[in-house]
Amino acid sequence: MTTQLTAPRLASVNPLLAAEQLQQELSHQGIASDVHDGYRLALVSVSVGLVVWCDGAWFWRRVGWNGHRRRVLYARHPAAEPARAARRVAFRYADLQEQHAPSAVIAEAGS
């Protein structure tokens, strides 16, 4: 008899509700975002280069490129933990803000 190991299945939540919870957690940290829904996925648009997708089980976002394997690298976090996911997204958001200062037009619009 052989046993097959499988990854544990996470409880799925409504992707749109999970994305809205992530958006709310981000707003508590002073980060504005937009939520979009469709095709059984939701996404949270945080900044240029920072979009978080949700399928109801996971939040995931692009974090880089593996040139050797020629594929995108992703970070993921359980959708049932929007507060912890928001902290991770906030760290990446802060990194992006340091790397790319807003243009003069956007900076003036924000003041």
Image: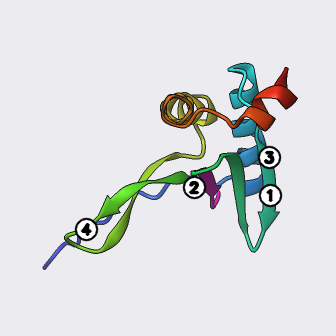
The quadrant holding residue 25 is: top right
The residues tagged by marks 1 and 2 sit, at their Cα atoms, a distance apart of 17 Å
In this rendering, is residue 107 above or below 66? above
Is 70 left, or right, of 18 in this rendering?
left
Question: Label 3 belongs to which residue?
Answer: 34
In this rendering, the label closer to the viewer, 4 or 1: 4
Q: Are marks 4 and 2 in contact (CB under 8 Å)?
A: no
Q: Tell me, yes or no, if residue 99 can be seen here.
A: yes
Image location (x, y in percent) of residue 102? 66, 35
Tag 1 secondary structure = strand
- Label 3, secondary structure: give it: strand
- Indicate which disc residue 104 carries: none
* Contact, mark 1 vs mark 3 (Cβ under 8 Å): yes
Q: Earlier in the sequence, mark 3 or mark 4?
A: 3
Give the magenta-colored segment's residue range.
Answer: 51-58
Q: Amino acid at mark 3?
A: Asp
Instruction: State which mark lies toward you, 1 or 2.
Output: 1
Identify residue type, mark 1: His
Q: Secondary structure at mark 2?
A: loop
Vertical comparison of 96 with 76: above or below: above
* Residue 34 in the figure: left or right of residue 97: right
| Residue at the disc numbered 4 | 67
Residue 7 seen anywhere in this rendered image of the structure = no
Q: Which residue is mark 1?
A: 36
Mark 2 → mark 3, Cα distance in angstroms? 20 Å
Judge the density around disc 2: few (<14), some (14-19), many (≥20) Cα neighbours within 10 Å.
Answer: some
Alpha-carbon distance for marks 4 and 2? 28 Å
Q: Residues within 10 Å of mark 1 (few under 14, many from 20)?
A: few
User: Which callout, 4 or 2, points to the residue nearer the camera?
Assistant: 4
Q: CA distance from mark 1 to mark 3?
A: 7 Å
